[in-house]
Image: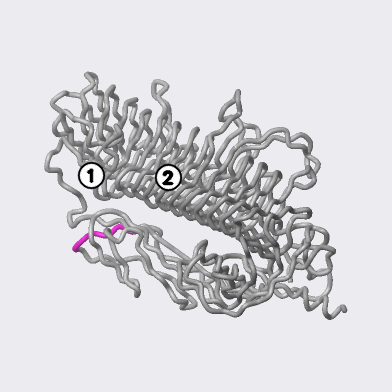
Amino acid sequence: MKKLYLLLTMVLAATSCGQDNFILWPDGPEGMFPDQQAVSSLTDPALTWSADSFEATVGATNSFPTLTNAYNVGITYESSKPEVATISSSGAITLLASGSTLISATSAANETYSSSSASYILTVLGASGSEADDDPLTFASTGDPSSDDDISTTKFKGRIVITFSESGDATVKGDTYGYVSVDGNKVTVNNANGEVLIYELTGTTSNGFFKVYGAKKQAIVLNGVSITNPNGAAINNQNKKRTFVVVKGINTLSDGASAAYAKENDEDQKAVFFSEAQLIFSGSGLLTVNANNAQDKSGIASDDYIRLMDSPTIKINSGSNAGHGLKGKDYVQLSNGTLFVAIAADMKKGISTDDYVLVEGGTHIITVTGGVAYDEEDAEYSGTAGIKADNYFAMTGGSLNIKNTGDGGKGINAGSYDYDSEKHTLSDSYISGGNLTVTTTGREVNDVSAKGIKIGWVTKEGSGDRAKVTGYAGKLIISGGSVNVNSTNGEGLEVKGDLTFNGGETYVTSLSDDAINCQGELTVNNGFVYAYSSGNDAMDSNGNTFLNGGYVMAVCTKGSPEVAIDANTEEGKKLYINEGAAVVAYGGLENGYSASQSVYSMSGTAGAWNALYNGKSFIAAFKAPSNISTFIVSAPSLSSGYKGVSVSGEAKCNGIWASDGISGGTSVTLSNYTGGNNGPGGGWPGGGGGRPW
């Protein structure tokens, strides 16, 4: 009997969709539940490009970044904007038009290597490196002509061209108003009469700045300019009206390591590029902003909102003693363009706002390496985040990739307790389109935990496991798009309010905590969901869990008392599997679950496609993790399972689910599953609950 028991406990698991990880549990109780062995079984190809961004010129000789592929794994190349540049199956790049695109290299998993990917931003410029205007006072639409944020809707009265110089004073053309004063390369504009003007900046200085005062809308055209201010902001916009920033050619704004950012007449100066007004970026060139200071000053900051429109590339590098990457006080809206943010300081954020962040389009990458530090203002320890929004986070399109390797670091952190100091209410966060990828690898430090995505807040009385929740807020609704979250040392997706899936494809893994967790109720109405945890529950709700529709696969390899799908039975809540949901689980279900459709145990084929069948047609196919071959399954009118099927249709959720194009395979008999969380793993070998085989 002991030999049979040990044979049954040789369970194998995988950490991610399409990633064939191997676990063999050793003899004895010490080897029963090895939390993180799944990650060490396959070799990571660790694909890397030689640069994270590159500027290329049409018609010139360009030495593009090279890919390190030490194990010579098979590569699939992709350009996010093939109208800008294409990349062949062998990695050869062809430049087609001005703009920016994300060049990606991806390798699939196999029996030896885990999946891997790497990317860089390619900015393509015209042969001259800049663009000429047919009419120097008008601009083409930047993608939203119904909005005042579209520069084409503004009529400008004049253009002033300022050329910075390393060898002499800056020069000025077109200043018929006498607004511009020059002190070496320190240029100040005082638009006293409030004309709607364009200020075009060009040339280079290592000791200068551009400051502007005004009372009407304005445009700042960056046309091949490089400004370094060793003492503070390179551009200081004190005009409190809407400011359009048109990016042409290659531009750089920098401060100095010893920049003091001293105030003049109580004027704010919060960033290398600071604005009192809204900043609306457009154009097809490149702007690089380097925050080298030791004064917590950001790369780009506005005391109003910031919006990216069609279609500049903005790179922000914030050093280990500087501030946030992009700080929009009112909100940040990424409608188009390409944003690359690299943050190194403790506690700082790639994008920070006192309100919301909305991603509508474009391609955006945020990398964070800073850790936890003590926040004197809030009198508590604080960590970093790729995005921090005090109200909500929303995504309707585009591509956003966040990687945070700092201890206590989060990918996205939306919803702050003090957003509304009186009502403590938050708007719902939502994802209805686009491609979102979040990776966090840091540890918990000083009670600041690392998480992939955290939505909302919770308050408690007491401490530890006995702490009582006294209030929580912050909902997330996923209705479309693709969401991929991988967390090494914390929850993958944590929502303090209700979490609802109405569509889209959501893939979440955690190696030490819940993959998907919510304080409120967890509901799946539609869409494709995959949750994997080797350290806690795969899907966990402190309220009820409702599986009403869609396709759900939950894998938990931790063992008792953790399960694949959990609900808060301790407080009278329950897991409901309702008619319409296709469910595949490994690791047991919450004790006392309620099901309006039959729940079975199924033996399939590990590392291959298996399917659910209703007697007439295939309901869906699911890709089993490597060497996991026994599952709990439930689906409408489910009559049998199939193993070893073929899938010609589109694979969803990183290759885990398919709902069409299913054929072949061998029929397998299903047996009733009556288990729950009554023993090790809730249906694991040796437990009192039903076993998933």
Q: Is residue 130 left or right of residue 264?
A: left
Give the residue at x 25% y 27%.
189
- For this orientation, the residue located farthest to the right is 1
Q: Position of residue 603 (x, y in %)?
A: 68, 74
Q: What element carries label 2?
A: strand
Can residue 373 be seen in the rendering of this structure? no
Q: Which amino acid does label 2 sit on?
A: Val
Q: In this view, does 17 lie above or below 666?
A: above
Main SS of the magenta segment? strand
Q: Where is residue 458 in the image (x, y as percent from the top left)?
A: 67, 37
Q: Distance between the residues labelled 2 and 1?
A: 27 Å
**Image quadrant containing the C terminus:** bottom right
Asked which quadrant contains residue 229, the reply is: top left
Asked which quadrant contains residue 513, the reply is: bottom right
Q: Tell whether label 1 touches label 2 (CB within 8 Å).
A: no
Asked which quadrant contains residue 305, the reply is: top left
Q: What element carries label 1?
A: strand
Q: Is residue 476 left or right of residue 74?
A: right
Indicate yes or no whether the magenta region holds residue 55.
yes
Name the residue beneath numbered marker 1: 223
- Which numbered disc flags the more N-terminal residue, 2 or 1? 1
Q: What residue type is labelled 1?
A: Asn
Q: In this view, does 215 lie above or below 349?
A: above
Q: What stretch is highlighted in magenta?
A: 54-59
In this orientation, which residue lies closer to the viewer: 430 or 379? 430
Badge 1: few (under 14), some or many (20 or more) residues near its Cα, within 10 Å? many
Q: In this view, does 682 lie to the left or right of 397?
A: right
In this orientation, which residue lies closer to the viewer: 139 or 691? 691
Give the residue at x 23% y 61%.
96
- In the picture, the disc for residue 359 is 2
